[in-house]
Image: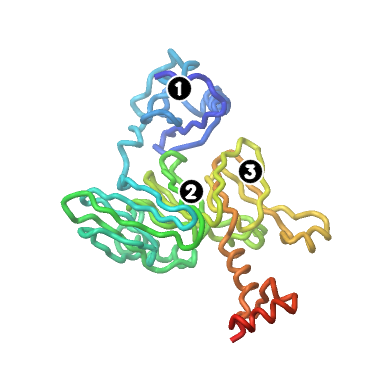
Amino acid sequence: MKLNPDDNRSWFVVDAAGKQQGPHRESALKQLMASGAVAPGTLGWTQGMEGWAALNTVVPWLAGAPALGAGMPPPITAQRVMHEVDFEIFGNEMQYVEVELDPQEAAVAEAGGMFYMEDGIAMETIFGDGSSKNKGFWGALGGVGKRLLTGESLFMTVFENRGSGKKRVAFGAPYPGKIVAVHLAEIGGELIAQKDAFLCAAKGVSIGIAFQKKIGVGLFGGEGFIMQRLSGDGWAFIHAGGTLLERTLAVGETLRIDTGCVVAYQPTVQFDIQFVGGIKSAIFGGEGLFFATLCGPGKIWLQSLPLSRLADRIVQAAPSAGGRGREEGSLLGGVGRLLDGDNS
């Protein structure tokens, strides 16, 4: 298999320690090879390939380069520790994901996220996330500590198929929006997500924390100082409010976003904040004092309706919570509410 040169293609490579690096544009990959940082026989993968392969076997401009050295690690596909689940997403505005489990396969989810499950699936509440990184008592205790910092429940729930055939379990979205299926192995094995975006994952996916190193981002970025870090090589499912935007940023490409609209992004993306500008725009523009900025390279996921914005609109329209309906600026609105009993 030979791939034609394409600088829009993102490459992932395996370093000498067996860790995935990337994504790298093809032009950036050439520079890394010219500097000696990446060897021609290094294992690489890009979209369209069935598995990892030595770069000199798939990239035409590396034809004839030295073969893979004996000291290089085996393909990452041979080191998988995540359960390989099948799934299907149903619905439009209020979606749910149905996960199909083979015997002994399992999925892990936030407590209270289950929609339904078939007979033969056993449900178990555990500390931590059940991943290989949190084995043993102290590992589980560390996982619990991380979940406390992200504001989540101390417990997660594992759904394991203990029957003899394929079984299904489903997880529902917590509010209107879209469920996103992310195959972590295809994006470098790691994803940074907002604290309440995680819905469920194949068992083995590690759910940790990611600190915002910049004080300004933590205070004004809309996501706080601590976000969730999803790592592994299996499927993870996150939820975005409203309409979802999935976009890949080029190197140096920057996008300004309303704070709170960031759902998730690859670790290669730089998350920062930017002052709106003029005092009049900051005070009367309705967008707050700061924008969130995302700078590539890497993939990002954005939501058009953050939960906080939805909650604010509901409170503003709820008279019982001190809000005022849109029709209350007129006499007819008040009379109408008396007639239909809304003022009771």
**For the residue carrying disc 3, how many other residues have a C-alpha within 10 Å: few (<14), some (14-19), or many (20+)?**
some
Q: Quadrant of residue 334?
A: bottom right
Report whether residue 35 is seen.
Answer: no
Which residue is pictured at 37% across the width and 51% down the height? 205
Q: Earlier in the sequence, mark 3 or mark 1?
A: 1
Between tags 3 and 1, which lies in front?
Answer: 3
Q: Which mark is residue 40?
A: 1
Disc number lying in front (1 or 2): 2
Q: CA distance from mark 3 to mark 1?
A: 29 Å
The disc, 1 or 2, on the residue closer to the chain's N-terminal end is 1
Measured along the vertical axis of the image, is residue 77 above or below residue 121? above
Tag 3 residue = 295
Does residue 250 lie above or below 67 as drawn? below
Residue for badge 2: 191
Left or right: residue 308 versus residue 329 is left
* Residue drawn where x is 61% and y is 46% of the image: 270
Q: Does residue 34 lie above or below 131 as drawn?
A: above
Can residue 331 be seen in the rendering of this structure? Answer: yes
- Horizontal and vertical percent for residue 167? 24, 53
